[in-house]
Amino acid sequence: MFSPGSTRGFGLFEGFLAKKRAQLADSLIPRPFRSGRILDIGCGMNPAFLQTTAFSEKYGIDKAGSLSCHTKFDEQLITFIHHDIESGDPFPFYDEFCDVVTMLAVIEHISPNNLSKVIAELYRVLKRGGLLIITTPSHWTGFILNGMSLLRLISRQEVKDHKELYTSDDIMKALQLGGFAPGNMQQGCFEFYMNTWVMAIK
């Protein structure tokens, strides 16, 4: 299920790492949320996380591809929407549309100049009481990721597209500016502290 095609470019460990991110994110989502809608931002053309997580309705956004469509994966209907989240255009959803928003290894591809606008849109489409989950490489791993990409262990294309490696504090400050309350946030690390997760409730 989690093939190297889950991300752009080639990397020997890409499928394994995508699976670990998905497992971590899935473990953070309480069961009551699963009767609602999930939106996975930066889902890719092969939305592996959406294929494996259990939700009543599944939506994915990515700038890859050119069409929005309903796509069937393993008998699961996933609505894929073509949209560049850094374009400045509003996300194509009405206010408080979804119960859970996930961004798995995506925020590092967002320019600091655009981060506040993206966070504001995340906040807008998330229901009151809804859950946001972000995973990203830890800020100190840049030289490690670069070395691994040169060895073709992870995707060179993905690493070259990194705009910023944010600290968990950077992310939590951006979330506060976007409207999330400090008391409704948690953060932690996984994969030997090489990756960070942040969770926030609207």
Image (spheres, rainbow, N blue to C red):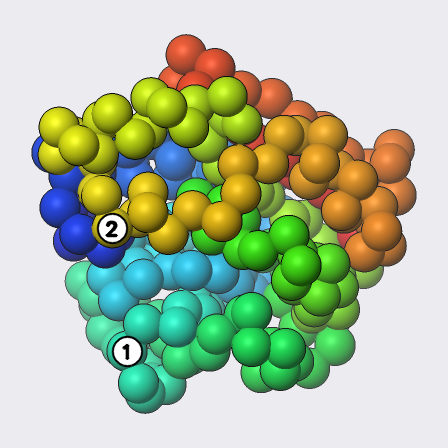
Q: Nearer the viewer, residue 200 or 152?
A: 152
- Position of residue 39 measured from the top left corner of the image (x, y, whole percent): 52, 63
- Earlier in the chain: of badge 2 and badge 1, it is 1
Q: Hey, which quadrant is residue 151 in on the image? A: top left
- Position of residue 63 measured from the top left corner of the image (x, y, whole percent): 39, 72
Residue visible at 88% across and 43% down?
181
Label 1's element? loop
- Position of residue 23 measured from the top left corner of the image (x, y, whole percent): 38, 34
Residue visible at 17% across and 52% down?
9
31 with respect to 155 (left or right):
right
Q: Nearer the viewer, residue 72 or 176?
A: 176
Q: Nearer the viewer, residue 76 or 193?
A: 193
Q: CA distance from mark 2 to mark 1?
A: 16 Å
Q: Which mark is residue 65?
A: 1
Residue visible at 37% across and 52% down?
161
- Give the crowd class for mark 1: few <14, some 14-19, many >=20 residues within 10 Å: few
108 with respect to 166 (left or right):
left
Of the residues shown, which amino acid type is indicated by label 2?
Gln
68 with respect to 75 (left or right):
right
Residue underneath mark 2: 157
Of the residues shown, which amino acid type is indicated by label 1?
Gly
